[in-house]
Amino acid sequence: MGRVSTDTAAMAPASTTIDWPDLPATQQPSWEDPAELAEVLSVLATYPPLVFAGECDALRDRMAQVAAGRAFTLQGGDCAETLADVTGPNIRDRLKTILQMAVVLTYGAGMPIVKVGRMAGQFAKPRSSDVETRDGVTLPSYRGDMVNGFEFTPEARRHDPGRLLRAYHASASTLNLVRGFTGGGLADLRSVHSWNKGFIQGPAQARYEQMAAHIDRAVRFLEASGVADSEEMRRVEFYSAHEALVLDYERPMVRRDHRTGQLYDTSGHFVWVGERTRDLDGAHLDFVSRVRNPIGVKLGPGADRDTVLRIMDKVDPHREPGRLTFVTRMGASTIRDKLPALLTSLGDEAGRVSWVCDPMHGNTFTSPSGHKTRSFEDVVEEVRGFFAAHAEAGTHPGGIHVELTGNDVTECVGGVDPVDLDDLGLRYQTLCDPRLNHQQSLELAFVVAEMLEE
Ligand code: PEP
Ligand code: MN
């Protein structure tokens, strides 16, 4: 994370002093015990902030560079983090995967890469149905470990407010490790080779090794010439992001920055509003419009000019550089049709925000074996359509937002060393959407780096 002021004393709990308007909020838990909930909310409001105002400001500055076409952002991580997967090796490998991808992109694009993890807060999910039926038994749907458990029993599926505190603690320990890794030795640019160690080796890893050898030589050259700042090479800026979905988690995490009197959602640096909760008159857009963090809003193929402008007016009325990012998730077969028209219809306004491609959520299908999956080729095709749309409209393709893991899972099909439809059952570990595995993630980075070079 950034080397900015992290003055904890300057962040006062604010939730007790904020009168949140009573607006419709979709996709919210139905907690059973109001007394238990009230207790949890007051505890959360006294906990330390997970991120600091100055760091959020620094990320806003970085995103302003993205909006201006001078930087590219890589956002990646689980669809849904789980409490059980908050382990040292899992966090390290996800982080190493993102760092590897970022190095590939930096090398290819010759442009700073703003690194953001879907991490340390991504514990809640919107669902298409409130309930799930299996073998004639109907129970509440799984809504992420912040709300209920995945196990298909009435006890696990109960919406338990105590899970908000567990999600907070899991996020705190995740961030603690991330801060340790990125501020210390692991992220040292002189260790690019070591980021490739410990993973199953395949074609993408071999290609990475070759590139790492070039980088090593360049780094040694710069050091020998005395022009490289060793300290700068030791650290990396890394930011956290999640969907601001469960308002009973986000609202108590809001703190007032005593330097400026302004509000920040201290649960993560970058928070976004999903495709299903971005109602113009709803509580989610209202919530993000009140905090100073850099904000994302997802846009599906149905988003039109009027909706987009109204979102901009609500969340970013002053068109502040770096404030608002639209994360488009149109689908590989739709993006070339929808996105150029949308961007063109916005005229100059399209240049006042960042545009990021989520090539995952418009490309999900169910395999014959019943697994929710995506094809690597569709993911690449959507990113290609995204670059083409921006080239056509004269706007900047600002980054990618992907669901990935450092682990060798079999959840998305395709890639150079392909996962076949028949392989999906081998290591299908996600509790929600399918993620790119380490190999597919690296391969995607190489493909996108080539698009950035063109
Ligand atoms: C997600 O990012 O996991 C998600 C649910 O996305 P969307 O809101 O775009 O459907
Ligand atoms: Mn998802």
Image: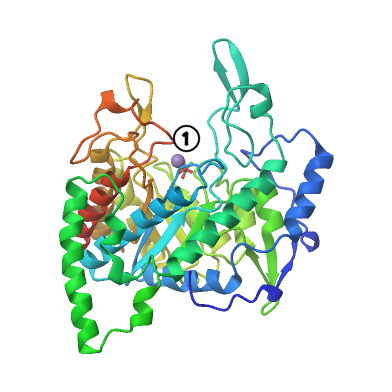
* Residue at the extreme top of the image, as rendered: 136
Q: Residue at x 56, y 27 (%)?
A: 129
Task: Name the image colouring.
Answer: rainbow
Q: Is residue 137 left or right of residue 350?
A: right
- Residue 264 visible somewhere in the drawing: yes
Q: Residue at x 57, y 74 (%)?
A: 54
Q: Residue at x 58, y 28 (%)?
A: 141
* Residue at the extreme right of the image, as rendered: 35
Residue 306 appears at what percent x and percent y? Answer: 47, 52
Residue 450 appears at what percent x and percent y? Answer: 18, 58
**What amino acid type is highlighted by mark number 1?**
Cys
Residue 73: quarter of image: bottom left
Q: Residue at x 25, y 33 (%)?
A: 419
Residue 282 appears at what percent x and percent y? Answer: 63, 47
For the residue pair 99 and 42, the one nearer the viewer reads as: 99
Residue at the disc numbered 1: 432
Q: Is residue 47 left or right of residue 329?
A: right
Q: Is residue 110 depicted above or below 307 in this figure? A: below
Number of marks? 1
Mark 1 lies within 8 Å of ligand 2 (Cβ measured) = yes
Which image quarter holds the C terminus?
bottom left
Q: Is residue 140 depicted above or below 246 in this figure? A: above
Residue 254 appears at what percent x and percent y? Answer: 68, 61
For the residue pair 398 and 203, the one nearer the viewer reads as: 203
- Residue 270 visible somewhere in the drawing: no
Q: Secondary structure at mark 1?
A: loop
For the residue pair 299 and 260, the one nearer the viewer reads as: 260
